[in-house]
Amino acid sequence: MYRLIYPMRTYLIVSGQGEETNVMAADWVTVLSHEPTLIGVAVSPKRYTHRLISKYKEFVISVPSLEMLRDVWIAGTKSGPSKLKEMSITLINSTKIATPSIKEALANIECKVVDARDYGDHTWFVGEIVGYTYKEEAFKNGKPDIMNANFLAHAAWTDFVTFEKRIYKAE
């Protein structure tokens, strides 16, 4: 049962361009390689986002904060670009690709698709990171500021959590 690996960080996946731009919530995102820097996201072929990533061969992984929870919920429960009218996000130009980024996000990771493979009922899109932006106050000294940035994680269907305001050191 895959729910046993939760809670997991949750992300917003931006795909498409212009009037076709769409935002989807996703938990199944992970780093795959340091060199080249590769990241993967699992998307069901039933999703509009799947069509757009397949068409444009690029996507943005936006890192939401707790303050974006309503937008994450809308992105995860509604389909198609019309939901953007209900969301409180601002789409801005990305630095290296045509797919836009989200201004309010703690970070935006711009990816070009280098591989796509089907596994069961999802496609695993592998993207090479070609650009990124981030809020400096959320990533102090090159590390996530878990004390103040309110990084969001998905615990179960309607339940989300942030990280405890304490750091444990392994020694």
Image (cartoon, rainbow, N blue to C red):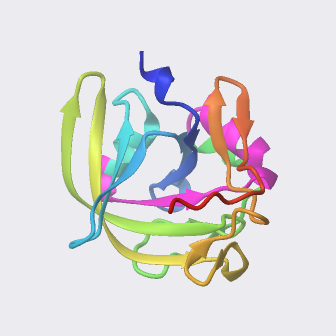
**Total numbered labels placed on residues in the image:** 0
Q: Is 131 on the left-hand or right-hand side of 149? A: left
Numbered range of the magenta stretch: 54-80
Q: Is residue 10 above or below residue 155?
A: below
Q: Quadrant of residue 74?
A: top right
Q: Quadrant of residue 106?
A: bottom right
Residue 6, position as x, y percentages in the image: 54, 31
Report the residue that reaches farthest toward the front.
171
Q: Is 152 on the left-hand or right-hand side of 95? A: right
| Res 86 visible | no
| Res 68 visible | yes
Decide whether residue 82 is among the magenta residues: no
Residue 140, position as x, y percentages in the image: 65, 80
Decide whether residue 78 is among the magenta residues: yes
The residue positioned 63% from the left and 57% from the top of the image is 168
Image quarter (top left, top right, bottom left or bottom right) of the N terminus: top left
Q: Quadrant of residue 169?
A: bottom right
Residue 41, position as x, y percentages in the image: 37, 46
The residue positioned 72% from the left and 29% from the top of the image is 159
Q: Is 70 on the left-hand or right-hand side of 111? A: right
The residue positioned 58% from the left and 34% from the top of the image is 7
Residue 117, position as x, y percentages in the image: 18, 40
